[in-house]
Amino acid sequence: MPRRKSSQTTTLDTKGARIGEPVPKAVIDTVTASVGIPRQPDHGLQEELNTLRQQIDALQQQFLDGARLVKGGAGKAMRQTEVAVKRYPASTLLVLAAAAAAFVFAARRASLPRHQLALRDLREFYDTVRERI
């Protein structure tokens, strides 16, 4: 069995160290002139677990409150959209068609230069291969 550690502290020799004197293997406190490990308060594992559980419960409650808030906002936006579509069906269709056309136009415009660059690179590669043959 390992030797038990002493919980008592001894005072330092203020006269100075002597040659060949063993160095204590402990914490040396220069303020109180004591050597040893001071007694630590006993914290029970149960207390720490209870504290962690309380923190987890608080985080879960915050998460649930946030989720309810987001869900309520999404529901409100959905109801407002439904009301707008019911009141203004023709305007809604025109806005959706304009948005779709804008997306299609942007997609085609973005894809054309890439396509032309790829064709030009392919033609240049074909020309260099033809010159070598």
Image (cartoon, rainbow, N blue to C red):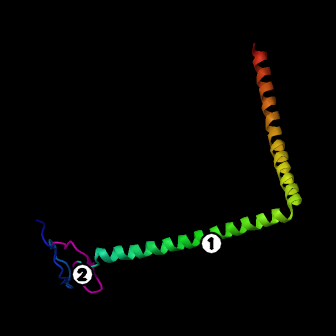
Q: Are marks 1 and 2 in contact (CB under 8 Å)?
A: no
Is 71 situated left or right of 48 in this image? right
- The three-letter amino acid code for the residue at tag 2 is Arg
Residue 123 drawn above or below residue 108:
above
- The three-letter amino acid code for the residue at tag 1 is Leu
Q: Residue furthest bottom?
A: 32
Residue that appears at 78% across and 29% down:
121
Neighbours of disc 1 within 10 Å: few (<14), some (14-19), many (20+):
few
Residue that appears at 72% across and 64% down:
78
Q: Which residue is mark 1?
A: 69
Q: Name the residue nearer the viewer: 34 or 39.
A: 39
Is 60 situated left or right of 80 in this image? left
x, y (%) of residue 127?
80, 21
Q: Residue furthest top?
A: 133
Residue that appears at 68% across and 67% down:
75
- Name the N-terminal-most of marks 1 and 2: 2
Characterize the magenta stretch by its predominant secondary structure: loop
Q: Determine whether the residue tagged by mark 1 lies in a helix, strand or loop.
A: helix
Q: Is residue 117 magenta?
A: no
Query: Residue 113: which disc?
Result: none
Q: Is residue 27 magenta?
A: yes
Tally of marks: 2
Q: Which residue is mark 2?
A: 39
Residue 132 drawn above or below residue 70:
above
Q: Please state, as top left, top right, bottom left or bottom right, where the C terminus lies in the image.
A: top right
- Res. 74 image quadrant: bottom right
